[in-house]
Image: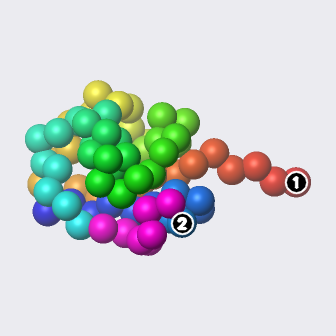
């Protein structure tokens, strides 16, 4: 099982701060597609992805027990 964390506006879109789903063996790109379809979260292509608190690319393969975080770009001043 994998824990998926949503930050900022992605949390609002998903309706959850985190969810647990089984995505071991899938790539980050595949996970983004699953999340978009299942939770209605859009614009994941512009978000940073971290696996176990380390930024990762779309071709990174997720392992059992990994925690994945989606972090959108943030602006401020």
Residue pictured at 63% horizontal, 45% vertical: 73
Quarter holding the N terminus? bottom left
The residue that disc 1 covers is 77
**Does the magenta run of residues contain 59?**
no
Work out whether 50 lies above or below 58. Answer: below
Q: Residues within 10 Å of mark 1 (few under 14, many from 20)?
A: few
Say whether residue 16 is left or right of residue 59. right
Asked which secondary structure carries label 1, the reply is loop
Disc 2 element: helix
Badge 2 is on which residue?
A: 12
* Magenta span of residues: 13-19
* Residue 51 visible to the viewer: no
Q: Is residue 33 left or right of residue 24?
A: right
The residue sitting at 52% across, 41% down in the picture is 43
Among all residues in the image, which is located at the extreme top? 59
Query: Where is residue 19, by image quadrant?
Result: bottom left
Left or right of residue 32: residue 30 = left
Compute the Cα span from label 1 to label 2: 22 Å
Q: Kindly indicate the quadrant of the structure image that contains residue 38.
A: bottom left
Q: Classify residue 17 by image quadrant.
A: bottom left
């Amino acid at each position: 099982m994998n824990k998926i964390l949503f930050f900022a506006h992605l949390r609002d879109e998903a309706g959850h701060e985190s969810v647990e789903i089984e995505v071991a063996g899938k790539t980050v790109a595949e996970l983004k597609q699953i999340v978009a379809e299942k939770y209605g979260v859009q614009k994941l292509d512009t978000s940073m992805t971290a696996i176990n608190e380390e930024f990762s690319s779309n071709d990174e393969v997720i392992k059992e027990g990994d925690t994945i975080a989606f972090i959108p770009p943030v602006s401020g001043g």
